[in-house]
Image: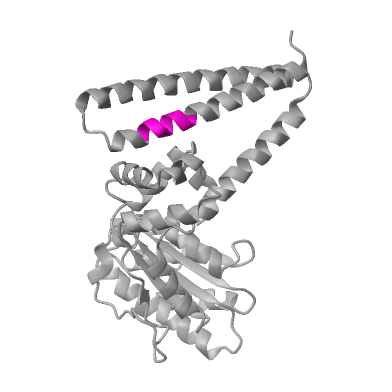
Amino acid sequence: MPSVQQLYEQRKLLETLIDLLNRKILSFRTSRVTTIDPGMLASIDILIEQNIEEREQAKKDLAEIDKAIASQGDRSHLQASESSSQLAITDHLYNALLNLDYQKQSISFRQFIQQRQTAAFLIQGSRHYGQRWLLNRLAQKACNLITDKIVLFPLKRVARSNDISSLWRELAERVGLERKDLSLSGIDVADYVHNWLRTQNVILIFHDVEHMPSEYLPKLIEQFWQPLVQAATNSPNHSQLLMFLVDYTGRMCNQNIDVTETYNVSWNPQNPIKLPMLNKFTDTVLNGWLVNAVDALPLELINETDNTVQSILKNSEDGTPEYVFDEICSLCDRDWEEETKKWLKL
């Protein structure tokens, strides 16, 4: 049986091989974007498949070596090395992705929260445009996700009822109010939430507002948010109060509510702020981002910037944000779905 030292040497060789195969696969994928000859495309596809198979076999061999190392009692060093390496890669990529576009929304958000302690924001866009990603990105800049009082309101269940009282019961349940009293109103819930502001910041997040019946959003604003803002305004030295209304389809943009789109000194926080609609990422945006993300990405992506951008656009339905994130993670040998379980807290 090989010694632990020999196993580590074999492990290092396999890691080098896997890295080489990742680079070859990326190179083939980027060259595929600019190839129009059908014969060449078929050849490239075969090479990609062969290299993927070889990489998967190398990963299996690496797993077997890890088992052998662990069986010889040297698991701690291996786990510590892998953990620190993977964490560093993930953190670098996450920090880089936080700088990928959404500039208009981020600037608007900062303009408002720098002026007031209280504000409500409407986040809107078509499906897969990264609404939840943007929500988490904005919230982490303005909130303390550990100490602040954060309440999530998923609204899909409310869609099954045309009785506004179902909305107040849902809110009451989420904030911890007794639901037996069927006469609860939005003002009752607002009064309860206002008590929290005496000691802590409060962040209210309404997911899937597009699922509410059309008349619910105006009532949510008029009968819950506005009384809550008024109570907070009348209380000196109250804590920060933020509300996010997240629309995952863009359907709520024409709702009959008063909204503010551009900051001015006369802005009333009782009116939600409609952040700019989310859009696809353009080649210009992606090119600029790649240049600034050199420390977080494989060199092949940076050295072949134009090909990389075209590859990302081709595999993301021409720049659909969530598909872009998915493709970038894939090019970095990461799994977008797995990473978001760690990255997205709200």
> Quadrant of the rendered structure where residue 315 is?
top left
Q: Which residues are magenta?
A: 22-29
Residue toward you, 209 or 194: 209
- Which of the pair 263/61 is nearer the observer? 61
Image location of residue 61, percent across then percent down: 58, 17
Query: Residue 197 sits in which quadrant?
Result: bottom right
Q: Is residue 12 above or below residue 97?
A: above
Q: Position of residue 188 (x, y in %)?
A: 46, 76
Q: Quadrant of residue 58?
A: top right
Report the number of numbered marks.
0
Q: Position of residue 325 (x, y in %)?
A: 41, 48
Quadrant containing the N terminus is top right
Is 181 on the left or on the right of 214, as rendered? right
List x then y, in percent, for residue 341. Answer: 51, 45
Report the residue that reaches farthest toward the top: 1
- Residue 128 located left or right of residue 25: left
**Height in image: 14 above or below 88?**
above
45 magenta-colored: no
Which residue is painted at 40% across and 72% down in the image?
Answer: 121
Foreground pick, 30 / 163: 30
Left or right of 67 in this view: 298: left
Residue depicted at x 63% and y 61%: 146
Residue 175 visible here:
no
The residue depicted at 66 percent of the width and 38 percent of the height is: 83
Which secondary structure is most common in the magenta stretch?
A: helix
Q: Is residue 245 visible?
A: yes
- Seen in the image, is 129 located left or right of residue 120? left
Q: Is residue 235 above or below residue 304?
A: below
**The residue positioned farthest toward the front in the image shown:** 303
Residue 296 vs residue 255, the one in the foreground: 296
